[in-house]
Image (cartoon, rainbow, N blue to C red):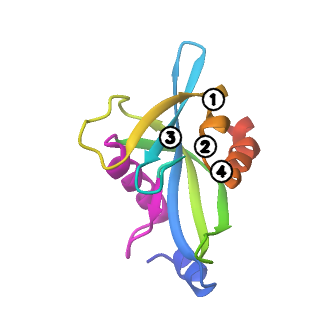
């Protein structure tokens, strides 16, 4: 685990990493969201950082596992910090990403979808994610 992860773990936070994946068609931008049937919610792809994995590696792995596509990181975004319903403190490193392909395989655990930029805030299920997206919109 890298030094950054050790510092965050020392604070008692759960470490996650994920991405805001953007693709464009002409002048129209689309953001990758996933529907998680288990939680019945829409959000950005993200997940737990594994041992000996950098935040960047975890973010790219999570997108690939949840959506079935490979991505490249364009730049870091401000992190998300929140408390879950179970009172778990979470630090989630987020990255602006571009997809290496936009076609999803049919065998993913989650249901990925390209959502038009202007519909993302409305589609996100949680208020903290809606606020996060509004705060980074100028970076997308």
Q: Nearer the viewer, mark 2 or mark 3?
A: 2
N-terminal-most mark, 2 or 3: 3
Compute the Cα span from label 4 to label 3. 11 Å
Q: Pick out the residue farthest to the top.
A: 26
Q: Is residue 83 above or below residue 12?
A: above
Q: Residue at x 59, y 18 (%)?
A: 28
Contact, mark 2 vs mark 3 (Cβ under 8 Å): yes
The residue at which mark 3 appears reads as 33
The image shows residue 21, relative to residue 4, as above or below, that is above
Residue 124 - label: 2
| Residue 136 part of the magenta-drawn span | no
Q: Please identify the quadrant where the C terminus is shown.
A: top right
Q: Which mark is residue 119?
A: 1
Q: Are marks 2 and 4 in contact (CB under 8 Å)?
A: yes
Q: Could you tell me residue 123's position as x and y percent?
A: 60, 37
User: Would you say residue 64 sits in the magenta stretch?
Assistant: yes
Which residue is tagged 4? 129
At which x and y percent is residue 52? 37, 74
Region rendered in magenta: 46-69
Depicted 72 relative to depicted 119: above or below: below
């Amino acid at each position: 685990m890298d030094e950054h992860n050790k510092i965050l773990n020392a604070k008692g936070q759960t470490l996650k990493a994920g991405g805001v994946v953007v693709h464009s068609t002409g002048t129209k931008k689309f953001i990758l969201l996933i529907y998680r049937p288990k939680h019945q919610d829409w959000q950005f792809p993200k997940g737990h950082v594994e041992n000996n994995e950098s935040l960047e590696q975890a973010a790219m792995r999570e997108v690939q596992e949840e959506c079935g596509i490979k991505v490249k990181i364009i730049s870091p975004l401000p992190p998300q910090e929140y408390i879950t319903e179970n009172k778990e403190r979470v630090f989630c490193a987020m990255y602006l990403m571009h997809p290496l392909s936009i076609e999803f395989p049919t065998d993913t655990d989650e249901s990925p979808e390209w959502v038009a930029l202007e519909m993302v805030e409305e589609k996100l299920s949680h208020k903290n994610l809606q606020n996060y997206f509004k705060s980074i919109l100028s970076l997308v």
